[in-house]
Structure formats: structure tokens, C-alpha cells
Amino acid sequence: MDREQIKSFIIARAAGELKDGDIVNLGIGMPTMIPNFLPEDVRVTIQAENGLLGVIPCNDETRDAVYKVDAGATPVTVSTGGCYFDSCTSFGMIRGGHIDVTMLGALEVDEQGNISNWIIPGKRLPGMGGAMDLVIGAKRVIVTMEHTQKGAPKILKKCRLPLTALKCVDLIITEMGVIEVTENGLMLVEINPEFTVEQVQEATEAVLIISPDLKPMA
Amino acid sequence: MTKFVSVKEAVAMIPDGATIMVGGFMGCGNPHKIIDELAKSGKGNFKIICNDGAQPGGPMGEENYGVAKLIHNHQVKHLVATHVGLNPEVGRQMNDGTLKVDLIPQGSFAEMIRAGGAGLGGVLTPTGVGTIIEDYEDYVHSVQEIDGKKYLLMKPIRADFALISGYKVDKLGNVWYKGSTSNFGLVMATAADKVIVEADNVVEVGEIEPENVRTPCIFVDYIVNGGG
């Protein structure tokens, strides 16, 4: 798979985690594309942390577009019944447990469900934006990312980069498989049939528990 | 008392080295005309408190959108923000050592400003527990444990000036925001010594339904008519 195929594969699988009626916050990048992969009978409400509920795409190229953007600064609008609000209200929703699912990327995730995704000291300092609040506040935290970074594992025994939050990740979806964070460690529950369990383990620093009910990832 | 000032008069009030809150998210909701004038003013050494460094390009093809202008001009010596990844110039100036950047989680940032404007001594949030945020002495008072759960006690944030943008502003200074532009404007309008709102449209008193006033006029010191 080339990188575009990898991305599409991950996004399509991640879309399968959303249930009809979910309130969802999607991180910049891959997660933003998830709505395009939802089946017709699954309708979710997208929250954007800069103060929107019911985000939908817009093709508005008029001046109006500057008044409505999503968290990635893309011009959007809200569906009928959607609304706009201020940042305190938005993060009240987020920290207060009113968001069902957040999906976001990560630099590293470890076997305790710790996540690092906002800083590479001395190299890149994009900032955490809303990520620290989202991962501690959303009912379910799903990480969508490529399994390795230039061949180096991103799923580690212990995160090495500064953390975004402690013990908050529920599920990791990569092009190699689907991994659940359990009390006993990381459990591989689905595997991309293009890979063997050994190959997935080879690309993962943390020791994987292989689910007795391991399923093919589709 | 008339609160109306020209954009030049507004900028004339802001001295070098001022601490300035700027409403908006990636440029959406920045008071663009005041920022344009500030960018032309030659003033600098500002401490800017704004969610982000905006972007090098705006949605209508603008060059250096919103607060990005002030950063591009090297008028900012200290930026307090939550995310600066969309403006590479911020990273360049950080690496050059000409711009100090403090990054705070976005929800904490909003609540710390709210506390600054609401007479609160701080905010308890679980966000940032177990991370390097705990060591940010300028912003974090302490780690507290309440009923067995850990929280960070975040300090309030205030500024000398808040520059915000309203779509409709009546002649008393009541503000209605359009779309997603209210973001940080709502709390910033409460948390600065002088609050200047740029009105996309100035309307008669009463034209904004009382129920639809988002920022009550008592928070607003000056109005710049940014319409037309």
C-alpha cells in the first residue's frame, strides 16, 4: 500500500467505529476525512472545538466563509439544528463528558494508553490545541495513525515524547491492525490480512496480547 | 458617553510592550482592521494572548492573515497560545530566539481568561495532569487532589487590552457574533482593562434582541466601526 492507500484504509476502518447518533470530535488530518466513509444509515454530529456543533462541508466562496471555520481553519457550516458557541462552552462539552468519541492522530501511544501528540522537543512545537482536553474528556478516544514512523515503532512500551495525557486511549487503528488498550496491555483484536502477527509485533515495541478471537481487518 | 473611536485612535491607545488579548481562531474572528492598523503602527514588543498565530494565508487570499501580520512584522515578543502549527513563521522566530511562545491547553486557556474576567482566583482542571504542563509555573499554581482526583490549579489570565470582533454591535456596545467567530471573544471581552470591539456592522440600540446579546455592553470600552 502507498501512503494514500494506507490513509484510506485506516479511515475506512475508523469510520466503522462510529455509531448512529454519536457526537464526534475529529482531529486535523486523517480523522477529518472520516465522514466521507460513513455508511448512509450512520449519522453522526460533528463537534469542532472552536465552537460548532453539526459541522458539514460548505462550498461557500463568498465573504461569509470567513465567519465559519472548523478546527483546521477550513470554511464549513452547520446543518439544520446545528449551532455555534464560544470556546468555554465548547470545552465544557469536551471536558464534561458530552462528546461520545474523539479520533485523533498520535506521535506515540504506549501500552498503558498514554499518548504523545503535541511536541517534539527541539524540532516541532505545533502545540496541543484542544487535544489535551479532548483525550481526557471524550467518552472514547480512538487513535488513527500509521503503525510506524519511517520504520520506527510508534506503539511503545512507554511514551518517550512529552505526554498529551495519561491512560486515556481506548483503541488504536493503523494499517496493520486494530489494537485495544486493556488493563493487561495492548490487545491485537484485528489484523490486516496482508500482514502476519509476527510482522505486526515486529513493528510494535510494546508486547502485543493476541486476541483469541483475532479477526481480519476490513 | 460615546464609545466610538476611529481605528487610528484605537491603535494610538495601545502602547509599545502592551499585553493584548486578540479574539479569534486561526484568524476567524480576529479584528482584522484593528490588526492591520496595528501592523502599520511601527509599535511592538507586544505580549499577544491569542489562541494561535493564525495563518500565513487567509481564506480570501489575504497575505499574513490576522495576528500573523503582527508576528511576521516582528512586533510580538511573547505569544501565549494553544496551537501555532498552522503558522510556520512562529516556529522560525522561536528558533531564532526572537519570539517566546507559551502553549496552554485550549480549554484551560479559555477558562483561565474567563477566571481573569470573572473575579475568580483560578480554575481546577484535570487537563494536563501528568504532563509537563504541571511545571509551567507562570500558569499553574499547583496540583490539587479533590475527592481522590487530581487537578491542576490554573491561574487567571488578564491583559491590558482585548481586541475582539463583532458582526453586529449596537451603539451602546452590545455585541452579536456571526458563525464561529465568538470563540474567545466572549471571555476576552471580560478580562482586559480596555476592551475594543471592531464592529463589522454598527446597528441601532434595540436592533439586537436582548436575548441575542452575547457580550453585554458594559464589558466594551470602545467601538471601532469596521464596516464598509
Image (cartoon, coloured by chain):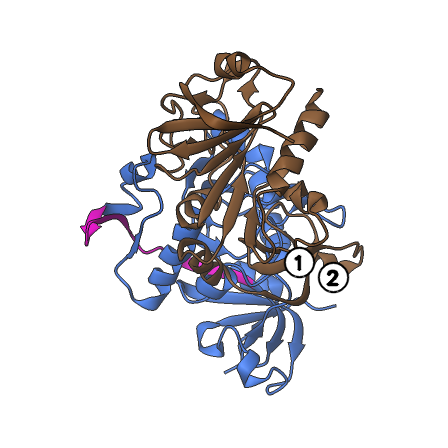
Chain colours: A brown, B blue
Q: Position of residue B109 (x, y in %)?
A: 41, 51
Per the image, the residue denoted by label 2 is A64
Q: Residue at x 48, y 46 (%)?
A: A130
Parent chain of label 2: A
Residue A4 visible in this rendered orientation of the protein = yes
In the visual, does A179 lie left or right of B86?
Answer: left
Q: Residues within 10 Å of mark 1 (few under 14, many from 20)?
A: many
At label 2, the amino acid type is Asp
**Is residue A206 highlighted in magenta?**
no
Q: Residue at x 54, y 65 (%)?
A: A85
Per the image, the residue denoted by label 1 is A68
**Is residue B162 highlighted in magenta?**
yes
Looking at the rendering, the stretch of residues picked out in magenta corresponds to B143-164
Number of numbered discs: 2
Say what secondary structure mark 2 lies in.
helix
Residue B5 vertical placement versus B58 (above, below): below
Q: Residues within 10 Å of mark 2 (few under 14, many from 20)?
A: few
Q: Position of residue A88 (x, y in %)?
A: 45, 60
Displayed quadrant of residue B169: bottom right
Residue A22 vertical placement versus A108 (above, below): below
Quarter containing the N terminus of chain A: top right
Q: Position of residue A72 (x, y in %)?
A: 62, 45
At label 1, the amino acid type is Lys
The dominant secondary structure in magenta is strand
